[in-house]
Amino acid sequence: MKKAYLALEDGGVYEGRSVGAEGEAFGELVFNTSMTGYQEILTDPSYAGQIITMTYPLIGNYGVNPEDVESRRPFARGFVMRECCLEPSSWRARQSLPDYLRQHNIIGVDGLDTRKITKHLRTAGAKKAVISTQESDPERLVRMAKDSPGMTGADYVKDVTAEAAYAWEVPAETRFRVAAFDYGIKFNILRILREMGCAVTVLPATATAEDALATDPDGIFLSNGPGDPAALTYTFPVVRELLGKKPVFSICLGHQLLAHALGGSTYKLKFGHRGGNQPVRNNHTGKVEISAQNHGFAVDAESLDPSTVFISHTNLNDQSVEGLEHKEVPAFGVQYHPEASPGPHDSSYLFDRFVAEMERHKGAVLA
């Protein structure tokens, strides 16, 4: 197979084997510590603008199938592996991972020391990078990586959001109506809401509060998504206007946008949290949840007003904010993914809480 090269802005160059599309791809190089779920990771819109390094050494062994996708297509810029399985073994497989990468024009490379790359990113932080099957000169590759755009200040939501509002699959029995802002929403969020009896209208990221309220929702959902939350200034007043009118539940980027709407701020993490094994403490119960995460920014705890905002969850690795809730109106969010697919499912109770908040709000209105 053809050679491929990975180059980092700080000078690192790695030679491997091309196992995807040919060409060049630029993005922020990050790592994910999940042992399974590579197809869900590739199709998570939160990875727009990024090149993913998988820390688990063997990727692609169970192939790819159409049931496990989390969005309409992969949004990652590139995929880096220690070893890519070319001949998958699973009754569910419909094609190999290399074929899937080529189909969607995603550049993949294997044969690299992903342990070394990950240790470097943990020390030096996430880096701008390039993967190329066309250029082999190390100096030119590093210069290309340096000259590529960074993640800070980038609005990738515009690249992944829905073009127009649409209704997700209607449940057999509708208990609630939910207006979901699509900043890069994952299908499993919509699947879970449907299973809980929610008829969901998905709205583009640029939708207004009036657009959301016009669907006559019982609740508002703010989804996950890519890029720098501070760049999405057009969303802050929309979220702020909805607070107190309907219960609000937010995940990942949506949680960060809720923080901005409440007067808080966010900052870029050194290398982010990505993987299905992240420990989080629930500050209500003291219990520890193992969570799935994918984010490179976090909410600044000091920027939040403690008289109105409670920090509900805390990351046990670096003490960053993993959840917040408003003390006066029904609005809460978490930094991680309670809809985690393929898992873990420790935090699925948060969807029950959202349903309970909608039930309570409906009862208050009727009373």
Image (spheres, rainbow, N blue to C red):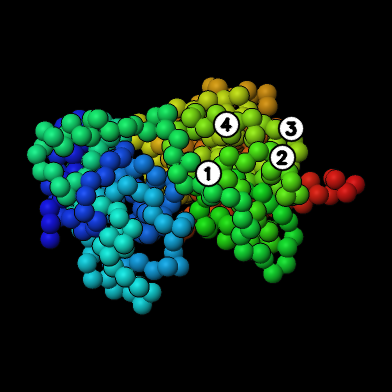
Q: CA distance from mark 2 to mark 1?
A: 18 Å
The residue singled out by tag 1 in the image is 183
Q: Is residue 64 left or right of residue 355?
A: left
The residue singled out by tag 2 in the image is 210
In front: label 3 or label 1: 1
**Mark 1 is on which residue type?**
Tyr
**Of callouts 3 and 1, which one flags the residue occurring earlier in the amino acid sequence?**
1
Count residues near mark 2 (Cα–Cα under 10 Å), then give few for <14, some for 14-19, many for 20+.
Answer: few
The residue singled out by tag 4 in the image is 234
Q: Secondary structure at mark 4?
A: helix
- Could you tell me which quadrant the N terminus lies in? bottom left
Residue 173's x, y, as percent? 73, 67
**Of callouts 4 and 1, which one flags the residue occurring earlier in the amino acid sequence?**
1
Quadrant of the rendered image containing residue 140: top left
Q: CA distance from mark 3 to mark 1?
A: 26 Å
Q: Is residue 299 left or right of residue 62?
A: right
Residue furthest to the bottom in view is 91
Residue furthest to the left in view is 137
Q: Is residue 104 above or below residue 289?
A: below
Q: CA distance from mark 4 to mark 2?
A: 14 Å
